[in-house]
Amino acid sequence: EQAAPKLANVTILATGGTIAGSGATSTTTVGYTAATVGVQQLIQSVPELAKVANVTGEQVFQIASESMTNEHWLALAKRVNALLTQSNVDGVVITHGTDTMEETAYFLNLVVKSRKPVVLVGAMRPSTAMSADGPINLYNAVLLAAHPDAVGKGVLVAMGDQIHGARDVSKTNTSTPDAFKTTELGMLGYLQGGKPFFYRVSTRKHTADSEFDIGGLTALPQVDIVYGYANMNSVALDAFVAAGAKGVIHAGVGDGSLAARVKPALSAARQKGVVIVRSSRVGQGILARNGEANDDQLDFVVSDTLSPQKARILLMLALTKTSDTKELQRLFYAY
Ligand SMILES: NC(=O)C[C@H](N)C(=O)O
């Protein structure tokens, strides 16, 4: 008889969210309480995990992900990096609320210093709901983090039997279980029959190849987002600048166009030293340099295909290294 294959060691870092949520009845799919179930109970509720990995759990936070902060990210990234230097840890799974999962995933994609798999997972339905999606999602995430094919692929998101890359995935629906999509640029693969199937990888730098290092950081520079809309004014922008923002992401309409009455305030903010990144609220497509605005003349940076919320993350990390706009632009085309 052959010896059973050695299972990989996977640590689950639990942060809260709906995957750890509970509702009043089995049909409660909104209006439930997030972040109530602890990591040991999550693990015990999926006995199948023991077949795909040696699983250990740590409760790092117990919050709904709308309350995630830069400080949570720094603490989480430091814990992930510490675990992944251990020879007895082969991969990490992070259970997380879905609202900001794409942001935490992208932050970790830029600061994790390892090729070992890091997989984020959540649920759209609380653990008490009929057809809760948390257990199968957690099972898929653990088998993905335990699998050699996931090594070196950057931080991954396992939702709805699909594998998504951290840079390009987004939550596209407020409430349905198939909310996570990588529209246009494409998901990386599927999870089926207890195995990952990969078809694509991101061409952008991440994890072990990243030049960002949060090892010595206790805070990140203040970067805020101003949202574009018809009848937009500069009140929010001016308030962020007055509050000390080091950078502002302009989530403009269309191709990141600047409203005539907001452009002077953006330019004035830049002249005060605030870095302005032109981005778009549209959700798809390239934000081209010197397209809808003369970025060279204004000394602005463009976000390329990053969503405003992901551009904010890259700019915070980039500002820990440089405030030179040419160098900042290089980073926006590299990550
Ligand atoms: N489905 C979810 O996880 C939503 C919840 N508000 C959270 O992000 O924590």
Image (cartoon, helix red, strand yellow):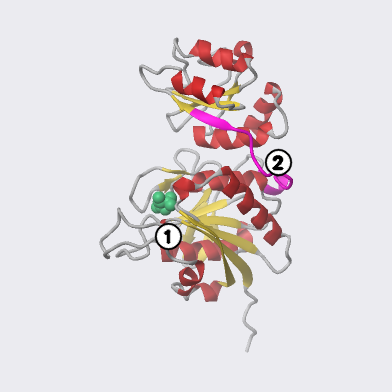
Do the residues under discs 2 and 1 have CB atoms within 8 angstroms?
A: no
Quarter the C terminus occupies:
top right
| Amino acid on which the number 2 mark rests in the picture | Phe
Q: Is residue 300 above or below residue 188?
A: above
Left or right side of 207 for 311: left
Left or right side of 154 for 322: right
Q: Which residue is mark 2?
A: 212
Magenta range: 206-225
**SS for tag 2?**
loop
**The quarter of the displayed image where residue 245 is located:** top right
| Amino acid on which the number 1 mark rests in the picture | Ile
The one of 43 and 53 positioned closer to us in this rendering: 43
Q: CA distance from mark 2 to mark 1?
A: 30 Å
Q: Which residue is mark 1?
A: 19
**Whether the residue under disc 2 has CB within 8 Å of ligand 1:** no
Q: Main secondary structure of the magenta part?
A: loop
Residue at the image position 44 percent from the left and 40 percent from the top: 183
Left or right side of 14 for 231: left
**SS for tag 1?**
helix
